Image (cartoon, helix red, strand yellow):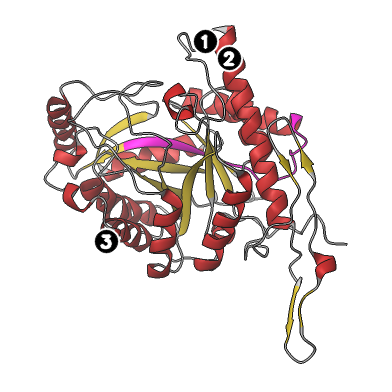
Amino acid sequence: MSPTPSAPPAPLHLAVALDGTGWHPASWRDPAARPRDLFTAGHWADLVVEAERGLLDFVTFEDGLGPQSSHFLDPDDRTDQVRGRLDAVLVAARVAPLTSRIGLVPTVVATHTEPFHLSKAIATLDYVSRGRAGLRVQITARPNEAAHFGRRTIDRIDAYDSPAAQGVVTDLFDEAADYVEVVRRLWDSWEDDAEIRDARTGRFIDRDKLHYIDFQGRRFSVKGPSITPRPPQGQPPVTALAHQTVPYRLVARQADIGYVTPHDAEQARAVVAEIRAEQSAAGRSGQPLHVFADLVVLLDDDARTARTRLDRLDALAGEPYTSDARVFAGTPAQLADLLIELRRTGLTGFRLRPAVLGHDLPAITRRLVPELQRRGAFRRAYEADTLRGLLGLARPANRYAA
């Protein structure tokens, strides 16, 4: 008797992280970059349309509460790197009508901002995009950014691994978990059929289907309900970047996707196992949770050309480029080999960070994607109209509905 053939592995999920002109600090000086267009709608529209051309699941938009810096926790005085950003949520809303299938995931800093405002902003984006909004939540421990708001101070962290620093970071991530919980409850504070819109009877809304969320936490006390009806997806996907146990817990407790930064298969396997253990400890073991690996990519048809291009960018920057994520410089076929190898560790997708957006994003969409398609590892057409659908996530029931 011949053995029963095993089911083919699920196709990869692919996302792209958009930041400035690219993730290499000298990317703006590359001939393929468009630094003069950086603060125009056209720059971002072109990038997202290109990503949709490649059938990618979604794009993320970076953001922050202070100018970019070459230092981890302090501002710098450099003038040779891109500084300044447009608001990520507003950029996503601007490009939404120009696309039809790709997910749009802006970054929002939970520290210092209000979950009520954010909940209606992302709900609005979900309406504007017709069900393609997501959210990437992050924290900030930078004292200079706390000074922009004046509501509290954050002591400067000198030794990141010290007990005092870990206490500060743990508190900020616990706050972010509460933040996401408030946002999720506010999304559910309107039942799906709360709006009646019956002109004949004069009833626009069923007030019994709007709910107080009554959240009480260390940082937030939020009554609700929202002013925006429940988003088309019910719950737009929540995502977060995580590098160690404390942020892994945020991913396990509140996220639909966690981005991680392993540098090899062994490390990827260990990270996935830790997140799954934290997910079980949080009581979410039966719920879907994607784990994506982040990689910085430089892609060319010849591996030597890609490495030479990285060397040239490093020379322009005046120092070798380092990243929290693995830096890959090679061919699309070599990257496809790596992604398929890493998928065996339990990862369900990848968020690629193009070193130079003008060069490496088209290389992803026009070279890497066809290579993965030839191997049966990536979609050939969009199979859903919503971001949750693309990710294989069911639309959740409303927690407040009877």
| Residue at x 55% of width, y 56% of height | 121
- Residue at numbered disc 3: 42
Q: Nearer the viewer, residue 136 or 147?
A: 147
| Residue at x 46% of width, y 22% of height | 143
Helix, strand or loop at label 1? It is loop
Q: Position of residue 35 (x, y in %)?
A: 18, 47
Q: Quadrant of the C terminus?
A: bottom right
- Asked where in the image residue 171 lies, by quadrant, the reply is top right
Amino acid at pointer 3: Gly
**Image disc number at residue 87:** none
Compared with residue 161, is residue 316 higher up or lower down, i.e. above or below? Answer: below
Amino acid at pointer 1: Asp
Cβ atoms under marks 2 and 3 closer than 8 Å: no
Does residue 211 appear left or right of residue 19 in this picture? right
Q: Nearer the viewer, residue 142 or 95?
A: 142
Compared with residue 365, is residue 277 higher up or lower down, i.e. above or below? Answer: above
Amino acid at pointer 2: Gln
Residue 131 in sight here = no
- Residue 134 is covered by the magenta coloring: no
Nearer-N-terminus badge (1/2): 1
In the image, the segment drawn in magenta is: 281-296
Q: Report, in whole angstroms, how far the alpha carbon at label 3 lies from the one at label 1.
A: 42 Å
**Image disc number at residue 166:** 2
User: Crowdedness of circle 2 by 10 Å Cα count: few (<14), some, many (20+)?
Assistant: some
- Asked where in the image residue 350 lies, by quadrant, the reply is top left
Q: Position of residue 162 (x, y in %)?
A: 54, 7
| Residue at x 74% of width, y 34% of height | 217
Cβ atoms under marks 1 and 2 closer than 8 Å: yes
- Asked where in the image residue 50 lies, by quadrant, the reply is bottom left
Does residue 242 appear left or right of residue 308 in this picture? right
